[in-house]
Amino acid sequence: MDYKFPPVPLQPLRTSVTIVQDASDTHVGGFLESNGQKRCFSEKLPSILINSSSTLRETYAVKRVLQHWLHLLQNTHLLIKTDSSGCYNILGGRFFKSGGSNNEALNDEAIAIYLMMINNAIYINIVWHRRTSASAVIADKLSKPDTTGEYGLRKKFFAKVNAWYKKQTGSSLQIDTFASLERHQVPKFFSRYECQASLGNALHSGWIDHHYTHPPLKMVPEAFQIASKRCGIFIIPDYKYAWWRSTIVANAVLEIGPMKDVLENASGVHPEANFSNTKMLALLLGSYKGQVKGVGSPTI
């Protein structure tokens, strides 16, 4: 097959960027570093690659992170780190001088990477590093996200909360602030790590009114500081003696139901039995119906 590359004007390279990525049996993950900033990425592998070779998954991971951050990579010097010797060799080693594979699927991934490199004026070096190196360990963790303890409302209970919120404010909930590609309640969402369709990380993004916020327990105080500035819903468990409880102020409170009935993780598993009778609450925050409330409003 003939590949025709459009001419790319030569320009001085803008900056240097490093990308480290990895692939597990179920996910790809990686991070980008540039000018002292770090951005993290994690998402599920396509089902067609679940039982594929590790080399194919690792090469796909390189392509996927390049696709995701392509808008940041144009006209840059890019250093790619991989702990897969197979991926390293297929992509031609340090300076892309050779490479390729007799395997059609692997070759297609390599060609896709080359096309992005050439069409976006990216000067790439690729290096192999040990799996025990600090950067490889971080990428490995991003490719193996632990979501077993990340619970969300079951759909019918979210519908109950959304209907209550609409009755109070006249609007439906519009963005899920602590979500993932596998588990989000509305089409627009923030996520812990960057992924396809995500609008960014909740703690580093601009929030809008009518947010739905169900944060991890350890992030309740930090999340509440942001959420309370906008009109929306804040989901928390009714822990009577939680240290942060006295700091939570709401305009109105809806009792959703016990954990054992209303929560599940991305795999459909319910919380452990010792927490099952704790009730979940939906708090109405911010201004609504043209009024600003907060100070002097009921605590939970």
Image: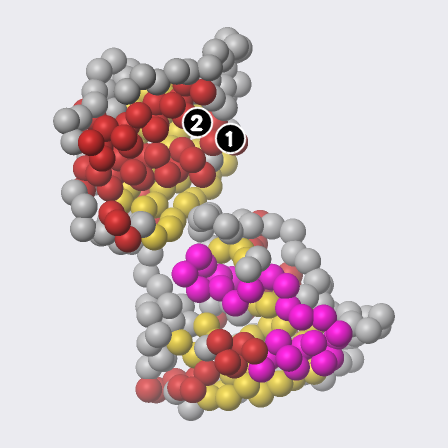
Position above or below: 115 against 84: above
Answer with mark 1 or mark 2, whichever residue precedes in sequence.
2
Which is more toward the observer, 88 or 18? Answer: 88
Position above or below: 58 against 126: below
What residue does disc 2 label? 17
> Which quadrant of the rendered structure holds the C terminus?
bottom right
Residue 289 % position (x, y): 82, 73
Residue 202 located within the stretch drawn in magenta? no
Position above or below: 130 against 238: above
Q: Residue furthest bottom?
A: 277
Q: On the picture, is 74 further left or further right than 95?
A: right
Q: Which residues are magenta?
A: 160-186
Q: CA distance from mark 1 to mark 2?
A: 9 Å
Q: On the picture, is 270 further left or further right than 299?
A: left
Q: Nearer the viewer, mark 1 or mark 2?
A: 1
Determine which quarter of the picture holds residue 93: top left
Residue 179 located within the stretch drawn in magenta? yes
Position above or below: 292 against 140: below
Which residue occupies 46% across, 88% down? 258
Crowd tier of the residue under label 2, counting other residues whose Cα lies within 10 Å: few below 14, some 14–19, many 20 or above:
some
> Which quadrant of the rendered structure holds the N terminus?
top left
Q: Secondary structure at mark 2?
A: strand
Q: CB atoms at circles 1 and 2 under 8 Å apart?
A: yes
What residue does disc 1 label? 72
Residue 194 % position (x, y): 46, 48
Which is more toward the observer, 47 or 230? Answer: 47
- Residue 247, disc: none
Crowd tier of the residue under label 1, counting other residues whose Cα lies within 10 Å: few below 14, some 14–19, many 20 or above:
few
Which residue occupies 67% across, 77% down? 165
Which residue occupies 48% across, 11% down? 7
